[in-house]
Amino acid sequence: MDSNSTIIMLSNLTITIDTYVGLFIYVTGILGSIGNIIVYRSKSMRSRACSVYLLWESIIDFLYLNIIVLTGILMKDFRIPITTRHEILCKIRAFCSTYGNQLAVTFLSLATIDRILLSQRSQ
Protein backbone atom coordinates (compact mmCIF):
# COMPACT_ATOMS: atom_id res chain seq x y z
CA MET A 1 0.00 0.00 0.00
CA ASP A 2 1.48 3.33 -0.98
CA SER A 3 1.01 6.53 0.96
CA ASN A 4 -1.60 7.99 -1.43
CA SER A 5 -3.92 5.01 -1.07
CA THR A 6 -3.50 5.12 2.71
CA ILE A 7 -4.41 8.81 2.75
CA ILE A 8 -7.45 8.20 0.55
CA MET A 9 -8.55 5.26 2.72
CA LEU A 10 -8.21 7.30 5.93
CA SER A 11 -10.06 10.21 4.35
CA ASN A 12 -12.94 7.96 3.35
CA LEU A 13 -12.96 6.40 6.82
CA THR A 14 -13.25 9.79 8.53
CA ILE A 15 -16.08 10.81 6.19
CA THR A 16 -17.94 7.58 6.97
CA ILE A 17 -17.44 7.96 10.73
CA ASP A 18 -18.51 11.61 10.53
CA THR A 19 -21.70 10.61 8.71
CA TYR A 20 -22.70 7.94 11.22
CA VAL A 21 -21.77 10.02 14.28
CA GLY A 22 -23.71 12.99 12.88
CA LEU A 23 -26.77 10.84 12.26
CA PHE A 24 -26.49 9.33 15.75
CA ILE A 25 -26.29 12.79 17.34
CA TYR A 26 -29.23 13.98 15.25
CA VAL A 27 -31.46 11.00 16.13
CA THR A 28 -30.64 11.03 19.85
CA GLY A 29 -31.08 14.80 19.96
CA ILE A 30 -34.50 14.59 18.30
CA LEU A 31 -35.61 11.80 20.65
CA GLY A 32 -34.38 13.76 23.68
CA SER A 33 -36.09 16.96 22.56
CA ILE A 34 -39.38 15.16 21.93
CA GLY A 35 -39.13 13.47 25.34
CA ASN A 36 -38.47 16.81 27.03
CA ILE A 37 -41.40 18.44 25.24
CA ILE A 38 -43.73 15.62 26.33
CA VAL A 39 -42.56 15.84 29.95
CA TYR A 40 -42.67 19.63 30.23
CA ARG A 41 -46.16 19.80 28.70
CA SER A 42 -47.63 17.57 31.41
CA LYS A 43 -50.09 19.16 33.84
CA SER A 44 -47.90 18.64 36.87
CA MET A 45 -44.98 20.44 35.24
CA ARG A 46 -46.94 23.35 33.74
CA SER A 47 -47.48 24.94 37.16
CA ARG A 48 -43.78 25.75 37.52
CA ALA A 49 -42.27 28.73 35.74
CA CYS A 50 -39.01 26.91 35.11
CA SER A 51 -40.92 24.25 33.16
CA VAL A 52 -42.13 26.87 30.70
CA TYR A 53 -38.55 28.02 30.14
CA LEU A 54 -37.33 24.45 29.73
CA LEU A 55 -40.22 23.63 27.38
CA TRP A 56 -39.26 26.53 25.12
CA GLU A 57 -35.60 25.55 25.34
CA SER A 58 -36.52 22.04 24.16
CA ILE A 59 -38.61 23.45 21.30
CA ILE A 60 -35.72 25.70 20.23
CA ASP A 61 -33.32 22.73 20.39
CA PHE A 62 -35.73 20.61 18.31
CA LEU A 63 -35.96 23.33 15.66
CA TYR A 64 -32.20 23.88 15.73
CA LEU A 65 -31.56 20.19 15.17
CA ASN A 66 -33.98 20.05 12.26
CA ILE A 67 -32.83 23.26 10.60
CA ILE A 68 -29.09 23.37 11.25
CA VAL A 69 -27.92 19.83 11.98
CA LEU A 70 -30.17 18.03 9.48
CA THR A 71 -29.37 20.40 6.62
CA GLY A 72 -25.68 20.17 7.51
CA ILE A 73 -25.81 16.37 7.35
CA LEU A 74 -27.68 16.45 4.05
CA MET A 75 -25.30 18.98 2.49
CA LYS A 76 -22.00 17.64 3.81
CA ASP A 77 -22.49 13.90 4.05
CA PHE A 78 -25.05 13.22 1.32
CA ARG A 79 -24.01 16.11 -0.97
CA ILE A 80 -27.53 17.49 -1.39
CA PRO A 81 -27.15 21.23 -2.18
CA ILE A 82 -30.13 22.49 -0.18
CA THR A 83 -29.00 26.05 0.50
CA THR A 84 -27.77 26.66 -3.04
CA ARG A 85 -31.11 25.59 -4.50
CA HIS A 86 -33.36 27.41 -2.06
CA GLU A 87 -32.31 30.91 -1.02
CA ILE A 88 -34.94 31.13 1.72
CA LEU A 89 -33.54 28.00 3.41
CA CYS A 90 -30.11 29.57 3.36
CA LYS A 91 -31.45 32.69 5.09
CA ILE A 92 -33.46 30.68 7.64
CA ARG A 93 -30.42 28.52 8.35
CA ALA A 94 -28.22 31.59 8.87
CA PHE A 95 -30.79 33.17 11.20
CA CYS A 96 -31.25 29.97 13.22
CA SER A 97 -27.54 29.32 13.52
CA THR A 98 -27.08 32.85 14.86
CA TYR A 99 -29.98 32.98 17.30
CA GLY A 100 -30.89 29.34 18.01
CA ASN A 101 -28.12 28.59 20.48
CA GLN A 102 -28.48 31.99 22.11
CA LEU A 103 -32.19 31.46 22.70
CA ALA A 104 -31.66 27.96 24.11
CA VAL A 105 -28.98 29.18 26.51
CA THR A 106 -31.15 32.16 27.50
CA PHE A 107 -34.11 29.93 28.38
CA LEU A 108 -31.84 27.57 30.33
CA SER A 109 -30.39 30.56 32.20
CA LEU A 110 -33.87 31.88 33.00
CA ALA A 111 -34.90 28.47 34.36
CA THR A 112 -31.75 28.37 36.49
CA ILE A 113 -32.35 31.90 37.82
CA ASP A 114 -35.96 30.97 38.60
CA ARG A 115 -34.86 27.95 40.63
CA ILE A 116 -32.17 29.94 42.47
CA LEU A 117 -34.57 32.73 43.38
CA LEU A 118 -37.19 30.22 44.50
CA SER A 119 -34.72 28.46 46.77
CA GLN A 120 -33.55 31.80 48.22
CA ARG A 121 -37.11 32.86 48.99
CA SER A 122 -37.89 29.69 50.94
CA GLN A 123 -34.89 30.05 53.27
Image (cartoon, helix red, strand yellow):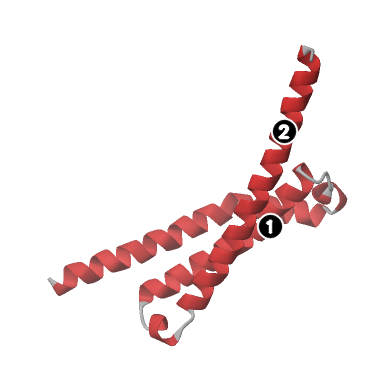
| Secondary structure state at the residue bearing disc 2 | helix
Q: Residue at x 45, y 56 (%)?
A: 105
Residue at x-position 69% and y-position 33%: 14
Question: Does 95 sit above or below residue 2?
Answer: below
For the C terminus, which image quadrant?
bottom left
Above or below, 115 against 85 in this view is below
> Quick one: SS at disc 1?
helix
Crowding at mark 2 (Cα within 10 Å: few <14, some 14-19, many 20+): few
Q: Quadrant of the N terminus?
A: top right
State left or right for residue 122 relative to residue 53: left
Q: Which residue is mark 2?
A: 13
Q: Residue at x 75, y 20 (%)?
A: 7
Image quarter for residue 45? bottom left
The residue nearer to you, when weighing 79 against 111, is: 79
Residue name at image x 43 percent, y 87 percent: 43
Task: Quadrant for residue 9, please give it.
Answer: top right
Give me the disc on residue 67: 1
The crowding category of the residue bearing disc 1, from other C-alpha atoms within 10 Å (few below 14, some 14 to 19, many at least 20), is some
Going by the numbered disc 2, the residue's amino acid type is: Leu
Sequence-wise first label, 1 or 2: 2
